[in-house]
Image (tube, helix red, strand yellow):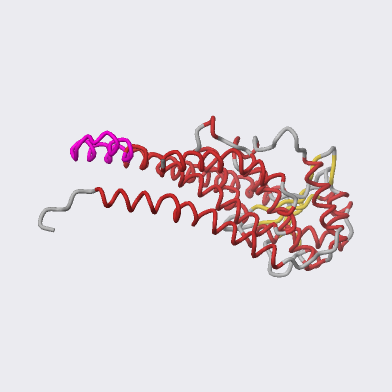
Amino acid sequence: MTTLLLGGLGLGLSLLVPEVLARARWTARAPGPSVVLWQAVTLASVLSAVGVVLVAPEELVRALDTGPDVEAWVLVGALAVAGLIVARLVWSTAGVLLRSQRRRARHADLVDLLGRAETGALQHPGGAPLRVLDGPLPLAYCLPGRAPRVVLSGAALQALTAEQVQAVLTHEQAHLRARHDLVLESFTAVYQAVPRPLRSRVPLESVSLLLEMVADDAARARCGPAPLASALCAMSTDGDLSTHNLSTHDLGPAGRAARRHDRTPQDDRRRRVGRLQRPATAEGSLRASVLALAVAVLVLPTAFVVAPWLAQALASLPPLPGW
């Protein structure tokens, strides 16, 4: 019974819940806590998969009453499979981090070689160094890492006012301070580690948009909503959103593939601009509710599914010699 519950929970958290959560409109009103909720859903789905691997063999041998020797070997096999799942996730995470680090280092070298350093009015106080690249397209992005940089194109400086430039810089610095690249890389690692039939591109895509909204809020608080909203519109070329965090495009094939066919960059831009044009409201109760839901997603399956099974499994173990 526990196997079925965990299996259904894992499939629901992997395939059904992401679709529902991605379509929810309230996540835009609490983007930071919503990212935490996405992390909880993803972690709970992984834990459910590991739980099925451990629980199913134990329930089977207990039902068949095969004896302690068989139970011991089955337990060893289940632990080995669970270890492989964890090892695959660790390997995927290490690979994503290493590839991203190398890619960003090469990009940073090119930016330092081709760009020019900006100081004075353009330099964000206390922020990462700013590099300006000559080019016809208005671009703005950040390079996270040990030596972070913010990159603007010369066309962006020509297209934007001073207030808009400061809003864009604040947006990119917010990505760097919060290390949003690490959040996205963790979701990419899970995406790559999960077997292909169970993969869902929705979490990575949705979290990417929510992190943009988190950075938008930082820019709104410092510069007001109008400069960033108008900058987003001014920097949209050929339907592509040019103001972005480079880490969303720096995650290899899985990260680049995480765009659903029914949602375009224009849709994301319109949603962000519309959100900035609405009055900012303090929704502490919503944020608290979303965080409570994230905790519940992690705690309740353990309390109501795993704990009863574990108590029963421990009670069925034979007593140790001398006890």
Rendering coords of residue 260 (x, y %):
70, 35
- Is 308 positioned to the left or the right of 253 in the image? left
34 relative to 124 in the view: left or right: left
Q: How many marks?
A: 0
Q: Nearer the viewer, residue 281 or 59?
A: 59
In the rendered view, would you say 159 is above or below 195?
below
Which residue shows up at 60% across the image and 47% down it? 104
| Quadrant in which residue 204 is drawn | top right
**Which image quadrant: the C terminus?**
bottom left
Q: Main secondary structure of the magenta part?
A: helix
- Looking at the picture, how far across and down is residue 39, in whole percent? 57, 52
Instruction: Write down the region rendered in magenta.
Output: 58-78
Give the quadrant of the N terminus. Answer: top left
Residue 59 sits inside the magenta stretch: yes
Q: Residue furthest top?
A: 197
Q: Reply yes or no: does residue 113 show up in magenta.
A: no
Q: Is residue 165 left or right of residue 218?
A: right
Task: Return the residue nearer the eye: 311 or 94.
Answer: 311
Residue occupying the point 74% across, 64% down:
218
Q: Position of residue 44 (x, y in %)?
A: 50, 49
Residue at image position (75%, 64%) is 123
In front here: 256 or 317? 317
| Residue 239 location (% of width, % of height) | 83, 39
Residue that protrudes farthest toward the left in the picture? 322
